[in-house]
Amino acid sequence: MPINESDVKWIEPPRMGLLERLYLPAIWQGLQTTVKHMFGPKVTVQFPEQRPVMPPNYRGVHRLNRDEKGRVKCVACYMCSTACPARCIDIVAAPAPADWTDREKYPAVFVIDELRCIYCGMCEQACPCDAIELTSLYDLTGLSREEMMFDKEKLLSVFDQTVKMGTDPVRTRSGPLSIASDPPPPGQPPPEGLEGSRG
């Protein structure tokens, strides 16, 4: 069925004046922004001499958590690799040792390609046993692609390193929505970096 001529509305493109054709107003606005930033407060951090303070819910390098017996918490359920939008997690499951009575499988191979990862946190949200987490470590460097493939041993060493440094991810120390959303216990000051965030 054709459209009625009365239902059609023709829209004319706006006409540009001489100044707009010369882009003078746009250039002037850009110069104003540049001058404002030139004389405004400087926010540059002199890295690596000056280390930035990351927010408590920062998502950096991954780690595989250990349970209370020192074993890897992962049960090789493939939920993290299934949820990963970048497809950077590879897991090979194996039957758990006979003395591990609390699970059927464990990851014989667990590899994360840190160059391919987009650090979205979907893996840690999908994990049913809190085995994988993103830490606050941000200075991730490597000289080759192979160095940026974090295997199970390297991910467990990140766990050991963050526990030793006392920089556990906020999700391991608080309630269901992380430390940034939960009020501090009575008499305890808010965590570092969150002093002014709660009204």
Image: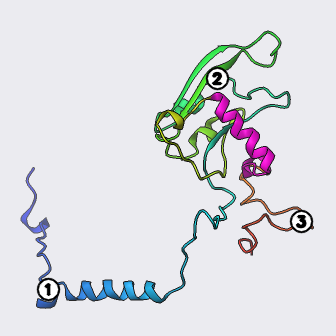
Q: In this view, does 158 lie above or below 153?
A: below
Left or right, 141 with respect to 184, comes to: left
Q: Earlier in the sequence, mark 2 or mark 3?
A: 2
SS at badge 3 = loop
Task: Give the percent coordinates (x, y) of residue 77.
Answer: 63, 24
Q: How crowded is mark 2: few (under 14 residues within 10 Å), some or many (20 or more)?
A: many
Q: Which sits earlier in the primary sequence, circle 1 or circle 2?
A: 1
Residue 195 highlighted magenta (yes or no) = no
Q: Earlier in the sequence, mark 1 or mark 3?
A: 1
Identity of the residue drawn at 61% across and 51% down: 59
Can you identify the residue that label 2 sits on? 76
Residue, far right: 187
Q: What residue type is labelled 2?
A: Ala
Q: Is mark 2 on a helix, strand or loop?
A: loop
Q: Provide the residue designation for mark 1.
A: 22
Q: Where is residue 36 in the image (x, y as percent from the top left)?
A: 43, 88
Q: Residue 188 carries which label?
A: 3
Residue nearer the viewer, 100 or 145: 145
Residue type at numbered disc 1? Leu
